[in-house]
Image (tube, rainbow, N blue to C red):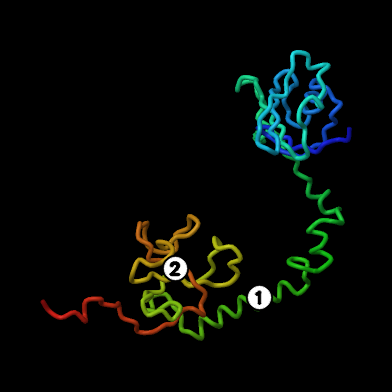
Amino acid sequence: MADIPLHVISENSASERRVTPSWSITQLKRKLEPVTGIPPSSQRISLKTTSKETIAVEAADEDTTILSSFPLSAYAELHIIDTRPAGSKLNLNDTSGVEKYVMPPDEYEKKSDSVLAWKKAEKLGRFNPDAPSLEKAKVDAFEAEIRGRGIEVGKRCRVGGDDSRRGEIKYVGEVKEIPGSLGAWVGVHLDEPVGKNDGSIGGTRYWGTESALKHGVFVRPERVEVGEWPVLNDLEDMEEI
């Protein structure tokens, strides 16, 4: 008989395998051990047919009972249960005790099929001969934006053209805690607690003291509009009662 494809399912694995009907149950169990990690003596096998019937794959003499004795059909499910006590089972999903290989930097440098090799070939990032001048141009552009907009610590402003996000500039400069933060940022203490932080970021405090209210926000200079923006009074338009 031709081999039959079955879905082999255990606690730690699931895969499609071809099974030979002339195998004995003992042979099947031996072949399943490297697939499931369960020793033959601890395997309890059941066959779930395409009609959803579940049949135990067992016999009094498993050395001579062959698989063609069972209603095998293509893509039926073969379920393998590990009968060992929980303390005796190997946790194949736990990789905490597995020593992880880390390639030495000098060996990685020699590889021709790595991301590093590709960056070198394409002259990207630090391998771009123009990178230093491009970075300087970006920093200079931020500084020009700050000067042009009159951004200074202590001045009133609003953020992003949003009239409800008014506040006071508390910091102007680099914020290394923000990924890709080349160039200056503007730290604003908003009048209302609608910000992203309390004046600190990544464990570094740039102004104020620790607070549960988030009045702080860091934005690029082009989003800051300096002006005599008074604190909004939500009650000023209410009639007297």
For label 1, the crowd category at 10 Å Cα-Cα, with few meaning under 14, some 14 to 19 and many 20 or more, is: few
Mark 2 lies on a secondary structure that is strand
Left or right of residue 123, residue 48 in this image: left
Taking 85 as reference, is 54 above or below it? Answer: below
Q: Residue furthest right?
A: 1
Of residues 22 and 30, the one drawn nearer to the viewer in this rendering: 22
Q: Residue furthest left?
A: 241
Looking at numbered disc 1 in the image, what kind of residue is underneath it?
Answer: Lys
Left or right of residue 197, residue 53 in this image: right
Quadrant in the picture for the C terminus: bottom left
For label 2, the crowd category at 10 Å Cα-Cα, with few meaning under 14, some 14 to 19 and many 20 or more, is: many
Looking at numbered disc 2 in the image, what kind of residue is underneath it?
Answer: Val
Of residues 54 and 232, the one drawn nearer to the viewer in this rendering: 54
Label 2 belongs to which residue? 217
Residue 136: which numbered mark, if any?
A: 1
Residue 103: which numbered mark, if any?
A: none
CB atoms of marks 1 and 2 within 8 Å: no
Taking 9 as reference, is 208 above or below it? Answer: below
Q: Residue at x 37, y 74 (%)?
A: 167
Q: Residue at x 29, y 78 (%)?
A: 232
